[in-house]
Image: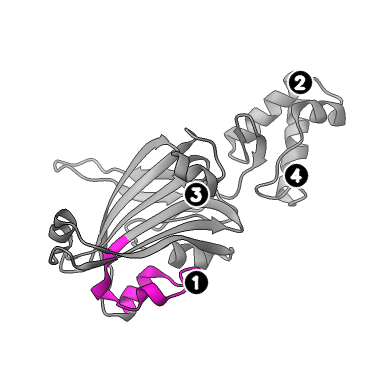
Amino acid sequence: MTEWVRSELAARIASEAIRPGDQLPTERELCVEFGVSRVTVRRALAQLAEERQIYSVRGRGTFVSTAILGEPPNTLLSFHDLVGREGVSVGASVLESEVRSATWEQAEEFGIAPGSPLFFLSRLRTLDDLPVAIDDTLLPLSLAPEMPDLDWGEASLYETLRAAGHTPHHAEYTVGARGATPSEVGPLRVEVGFAVLAASSLTRDESGRLLVSGLITYRGDRYRFRSTQVAGTEPLGPTPAREALAHRGRPVG
């Protein structure tokens, strides 16, 4: 009976009778619909969760997950550049946009004079209208002085830098897990303490000059960090391949 219930629900998910992001009926409703016990329903749901077809949020219910998409190893792509190739609706709404004066520490980091203008941009990233991440970036305004006037609901940061003659070449990437803060719960539609992954990055050009300091805070249920490690005599760093459980798409810093 467990396999029958699992197969029926899996078929609905595959046919999109239940769409990615939709909430499943409650355990009680499924028991009534299929005429089985709650134990059977729970086992079926557990199998679907192991297959990453569904996920549960405490106090809210069980929802349909989305396809897990992979990133080409060692490929530096912006969120917009990568996800835009996957045929999904990529969304970005500006949470904050302003020009700031560089502190002494920031000036040293970017190799500019203290007080020089920096452009700060914070955006909510969505895939097919599902909130995925809060994307914060900081970079010298001199790289592309027109940045404050661009429509960042549509513009790609990397494309803007390339057009200005500053091509991102590589990035140092660090991921840490923590709970969502009060300022993050509204945009990400989660509760305080909900698991998030904070991914900080320092993106540089081919010469090693720092172009962008970034921080992307992902919903933990829509993002996964995977690394490939190779045995050898020299220490090797991870090769990040980041996967998001967001509707048919995935974010990348």
On residue 11, the disc is 4
Mark 3–mark 2 Cα distance, whole angstroms, equals 31 Å
The first of marks 3 and 2 along the sequence is 2
State the residue position of label 2. Answer: 38
Q: Say what amino acid the circle numbered 2 marks.
A: Arg
Q: Secondary structure at mark 1?
A: loop
Count neighbours of disc 2 (C-alpha within 10 A) and say few if under 14, some if 14 to 19, many if 20 or more: some
Q: Secondary structure at mark 4?
A: helix
**Looking at the image, is 94 positioned above or below residue 53?**
below
On residue 154, the disc is 1
Residue ID at (39%, 35%): 178
Answer left or right for 96 relative to 138.
right
The image's colour scheme reads one colour
Depth-wise, is mark 3 or mark 1 nearer the camera? Answer: 1
Question: Does residue 155 show up magenta in the picture?
Answer: yes
Give how far across and how far down residue 48 sits, in percent: 65, 35
Give how far across and how far down residue 77 sits, in percent: 38, 63
Mark 3–mark 1 Cα distance, whole angstroms, equals 21 Å
Residue ID at (17%, 66%): 209
Residue ID at (23%, 40%): 231
Give how far across and how far down residue 78 sits, in percent: 39, 63
Query: Magenta stretch?
Result: 138-162
Mark 2–mark 1 Cα distance, whole angstroms, equals 47 Å
On residue 244, the disc is 3
The first of marks 3 and 1 along the sequence is 1
